[in-house]
Every structure is written in C-alpha cells, then in structure tokens.
Image: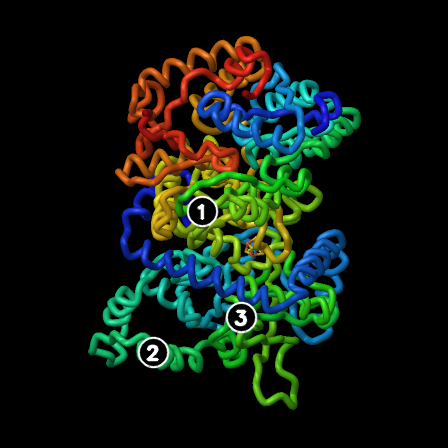
Amino acid sequence: MSNETDKIEVALFVTCLVDINRPSVGFATVKLLEQTGCKVVVPDAQTCCGQPAYNSGDRRTTKQIAADVIKAFKGFRYVVAPSGSCAGMIKKHYPELFADDPDMLLEAEDLAARTHELVSFLADVRKFKVDDVEFEKKVTYHDSCSSLREMKVKDQPRSLLAGVEDLELIEAEDREACCGFGGTFCIKYSEVSEEMVDRKIDNLRATGAEVVTAGDLGCLMNIAGRLYRQGHKMKVLHIAEILADMGDKPGIGEERR
Amino acid sequence: MEVTSRQFKENAHEAMQDENLRAALGRVKTGFTTARRTAADALPEFEDLRDQARDIKNHVLDNLDYYLEYFEDQVTQQGGHVHWCSTHKEARDAILKICRDVDAKTVTKGKSMITEEIALNKFLAAEGIEPIETDLGEYIIQLADEPPSHIIGPAVHKTKDQVTELFHEHHQKYGYTEREEDAEKLVGEARAVLRHKYVTADVGITGANFLVAETGSTVIVTNEGNGDLTQSLPKTHIVVASLEKVIPTLEDVSTVMRVLARSATGQEMSVYTTFSTGPKRSDDIDGPENFHVVLLDGGRSEMIGTELQELLRCIRCGACMNHCPVYHAVGGHSYGWVYPGPIGAALNPQMVGLEEAYHLPNASSFCGRCEEVCPVRIPIPKILRHWREKAFEQQIGPKPDRWGIEIWGFFAKRPALYRLMTKIGARVLSSLSGKKGRLKKLPFNNGWTRCRDLPAPQGKTFMEQWAAKGGRGD
Ligand code: SF4
C-alpha cells in the first residue's frame, strides 16, 4: 500500500441533504473513496450547490453561491459528490451561469472538469471493484433523473451492485421515470408530486425487492417518506451505504434501533 | 380557446380525481413510450437523424425571411395565394373572407393545432359557417365540446365508453339509434357520418406539418386519410400554418419526417403523407379549384434571436408529453391552453403571458425526459428555467416562495452561520422524531408532510462529526 503522501486527494462535496439528514452517506462515501486509495478532504466553506435558488429562478443568489463553491474547491484534482443532482449542478450548470463572465467561466469550467458523481467516479475513474461486501437482499435500483440524464450514470451502479455478494438486483418497470422529488417542486406542487411518487412506488413494490436504492438522497427521502406514510415496508438506502457495507443500519426514515 | 393556465393546480387536482382520465393517461404512458423506444432502437442512425433534423430547422430559423418569400413565390407560381397574418384575428378574418367569397355554409377540417390556437371553430360557427372536424379524435372532442388534450391524440383522454355515449347522443339523427360498444364499429359509424360531410362541404381547411419552400407545397401527415378527403373534395382548400413550418427542400422534408412519426407514435411513417401544390390543373382528375395558404406569425417572429428561438424547431410530434411524468399525472387540459405538456409549459408563457401561465414552467421536476426524447433536441428544461428566472425578476408568483429562497440564500452564503443553523435544525428534528426516525408533521410548511413522512435527520450533521473526528472518516 502506498503511504499517505502519494494518495490522490479528493475533495468531498457532502451535499446539504447528506450533511443535515443522513451523514452516514457521507461516511460511506469517505470509506469507499479511501478504499480506492484516495485521501479525502472536506473543505470547510461548503454549504450547498445552489440548486434551490437556481430552480426557483433566483440567478443572482445562485451565482453568488456558485462562486463560493468554486473558491472552496479550488485546486483539488478531484471533487466528488454522492449525488447526481449536485454533481450535475456543478458540472452542467455552473459554466452556463457564468457564460457572460470570461474569468469566472474559466474557473467554472475548470471545476466542472474535476467534478464527479460518486458512483461513476468509483467505477469509471477509480475502476473500483467491490470486495468482501455481503448483502443478502433483493434490491431494486431507481435511476434518478440527474444521475441518469445529466451524469450518464446507468451501468455503473449496476455493475458495482453486481459485485456485492448475495445481492439480487431486480429491475423495476419504468425505472427511468422521475419519482416526483424535483427539489422545491415536491413542496410547491405536492399533489402532482404525490401522484408521481405513487406510480414510482407501485413499480418498485411490484419487483418484490426488500430494498430500494439510488444515488440521490433527495429521491430516496421522497420515496421513503411516501412509502412509510402509506404503511409499506421497504428499506431505503443510498447506494454508497450498500457498497460500503453499511447496509445493516436503519434505512432512510426507518425506526431507530 | 379560453386560457385557464392560472388554475393549473385546481385543474390538475380535478384531473387527478378523474378515474377515466387516469386510465386513459396510463395508456399514453405505456403505449407511446414503448413504441418510440422500439422504433428508435430499430434505426441505428436515429440519433444522427435527430441532429440533422435539428440542423435543418436551425438553418431555416436563421434564414426565415428568405425561405418564406421563396415559399410564397412558389405558391403563387403554382396558382395559389399566400395570406400573411401577424395576429390570430387577422388569420381568422382572412379565412372568413375566403369562405365568404365562395359563399360557404360548411367547412370540413383536418386536424390542425393552429386552428385551435386561433379558436377558429367558435369563430366560424358564430359567423354562420359550420365547421366539421374529420380527424376521429378531433371529431370526438368537437362533439364533447372540449379542447384537445394532446397534440397528436386530441381525444386521448376519452375512454371507449365515453365515445359510445357521445356517438349515441349525436348520431341518432343520422339513424344510429343503437348504442354501439365495439371500437371498430364506432370508427365505422363515425366514418359513415363524416363521408356525407366531405362531399357537401364548400371549403376544406387543413393545417400543415411542413411548407416546402422549393416547390411551394404544403405537407400533411395523418393516419386516417381524412386530411386528403378534406383537401381534395371541396372546391376551396385553405391551409393554415405558422411560419416556422417552412422547410427548404423536399429532401429536407424527408429527413425530418423520418424522426417525426417514430417520435410520435413509434411508426416508421404515418399512414398518409399528402403534398398539395397549388389548385387543380386542367388535366387533374381531382383537387380544389382555389388554393390558399394562411400564414400566421402569432408572436413567433418575436422569438427569433431570443432564448426562445429553439422552441420554433418543434415539429409537434408529442413525444415530450408522451414521456412527461407531470403530463401523465395531470393530463392535457390542466395546462389550460392549446399546447399541453412540456412544449406547452415552455411555449405558453410567451403566447398567453407569463403572469397567466406562471405555473406551467414551475410545475416541473426538471427530470429532463422531454429533452431526452425530443426529435429536434429542444432544451425544454433550460427554457422552463428561463421562465422561472423571468418570473423571479418580475416578482410573479407566491411571495412566501420567494421569501423562503431569500432566507435560505442568506444562510447558504455564510458557512459559519449555516453550520450553526444546520446543527440546531438537525438536532431539533432528530429529537422531535424520537425513535420513529421520521416526522408526520412540520410546524411551518405542509407541502412535504401533506402526503409524505419526513425522514428525520440522524442527529449530528456530517460536518459536525467530521470536525469532531479531526477530519477523518473512521
Ligand atoms: S418539443 Fe420536441 S418532443 Fe415536444 S412536440 Fe415539439 S418536437 Fe415533439
């Protein structure tokens, strides 16, 4: 094993939901990154990627937040987020935000080039193979929209999950349809969102899987929240938790032990 | 038609309670999406064709004046007439004048979104001219006195039983006194009723999928052949089209057509593709004696050179609505104007005003599926975001939403303060949830908890724990 100093430094973008709601996803991420031989740094000045403002049409606030993120993550070779939507925000939308400011545009493009969604970083960049992880469960994977469409994450989670011993992956009908989360959308248009998440849940439950997983905490909180409100039993976990052998902890929204 | 986009939430609420509608929308969702996938997979060059279709449309939009004048010249040379109309009213008046000139009593119509846009049927009826829709779907909603709910399947929201009832109510006067339940026989009944109308109509009105600049032809694609009868039997044929429909050459038309039907219904080609070039010539056996093209701007030229220009590439295939989970949930009528679904959400604020259509670009989860399937690669989410930014600038929309973002933004820009707030917030919510791990209610907003539990924070924030561990994962 190489020593500390030759390890590749990766800056972790925790994401606001992971930070506040489910830190264990952050620790699972750290563990996975370390397993691939990276040294993880968590820049202190980070808060959120700015999506709430961006999606609400508040471009000025978004640009201010984006500028802060760009500054906080300057100089790291890799920036990794356990979320397709936050990584997508940085990668796809930051450059667009600064299209009319050449200096900032360069910086935004530079950060974009260094930023990765966790699962694709593990699979594509670090060629990570899951080793010695057991999870004897039937699992179904939800393709979250930003992971799938903005970050082109589709095969990577499936091949990583295939490396988990005893895990049986069962694909759901219409797995590429949105779960109805959409950030503030699910609050402002809660009834429409409810209809969408209900359809998603029907399809997930029809697989007979015991566990549902995805790479975006927002979607998972939405799915878990509705599942439990309806009185269903299914365990909801972020994919990083399964891959990092933390699948035995209480799922999202589940009773604590 | 009357604009009801302001009541999007109420419209959607009602739609979601309607069991018939839910069943009908379920069929849109599974039928059309699978068909498109299969058609696209069967054609290796499909993605290249999409690029070509996009490029053709872009080229036209960058040279629109040139191609429109070219088109007009060709139509004139073929013995037809082009009427330039900048507003809906001008277009209606132009059509009325043509009808009056031939003393028309009835007009048959092929399916056309543009005539919905200018609300032509009500207008003609008020002027004493009876319009008869000949596309089966359009005919059904005409009987039901409803606007279309989908751009290629106007009556996609109706179940067979509802059609049975409508026909039973309206066809008794033609001698159909039995209630017909069989789908095929229902189609036969409509065909028989319509057949008589074709031959007696004074004017046939159709839309156009394309206007071909090099030949002055107008092109319609249909699956029922009703468009052909509409335009070839009456003495006068009026084509109503908006200006972005022009395409340079026949070759270009064939390229765009290769993505149109595949995206729409998953067919390789629509069943009928009909080119009309001028009126009947002396040795033609059929065709109209008068050929008119009513060319509508309707606010479109204002979009050229703006962020919205890309919307003018739309070829009205309906793929975006077939794949949109919001459309699947709320149906077409909820959007409150002619164009539903993602393209409607992007286009309607321009056409009916942002204040009126505020909800449409907001009621999207930005899932991006519309852009993924759009044959001409219109970046619909980007345009929806453009409208959200405009609305935010102009302070349109609920105040509390804007305040919420401002308060959140204040903290997000101040890491130390943000850290303190998240630390407190996570603890409070976590302890409120107790051992349950989730919350049924929040004190300040029920948008989330109305239908969902809120998974509670685990306790200390990640940043807090990370700092306590001195920046180590284990
Ligand atoms: S926006 Fe694209 S997908 Fe939607 S109707 Fe127009 S061409 Fe078809």
Ligand 1 lies in quarter: bottom right
For residue A166, which numbered disc appears in the image? Answer: 1
The residue under label 3 is which amino acid type? Gln
Identify the chain of the residue marked 3, using the numbered disc in the image: B
Label 3 – label 2 distance at C-alpha: 20 Å
Displayed quadrant of residue A106: top right
Q: In terms of secondary structure, where does tag 2 sit?
A: helix
Q: Is residue B123 above or below residue A188?
A: below
Q: Residue at x 72, y 56 (%)?
A: B55
Q: Between label 3 and label 2, give the one nearer the viewer.
A: 3
The residue under label 2 is which amino acid type? Glu
Q: Which residue is mark 3?
A: B267
Number of other residues with Cα within 10 Å of mark 2, as a class: few under 14, some 14 to 19, many 20 or more: few
Q: Position of residue A41 (x, y in %)?
A: 64, 20
Q: In terms of secondary structure, where does tag 1 sit?
A: loop
Q: Does the CB distance between marks 2 and 1 fall below 8 Å?
A: no
Number of other residues with Cα within 10 Å of mark 1, as a class: few under 14, some 14 to 19, many 20 or more: few
The residue under label 1 is which amino acid type? Asp
Number of other residues with Cα within 10 Å of mark 3, as a class: few under 14, some 14 to 19, many 20 or more: some
Q: Do discs 3 and 2 belong to a common subunit?
A: yes
Q: Which residue is mark 2?
A: B184
* Extreme residue in the left direction: B178
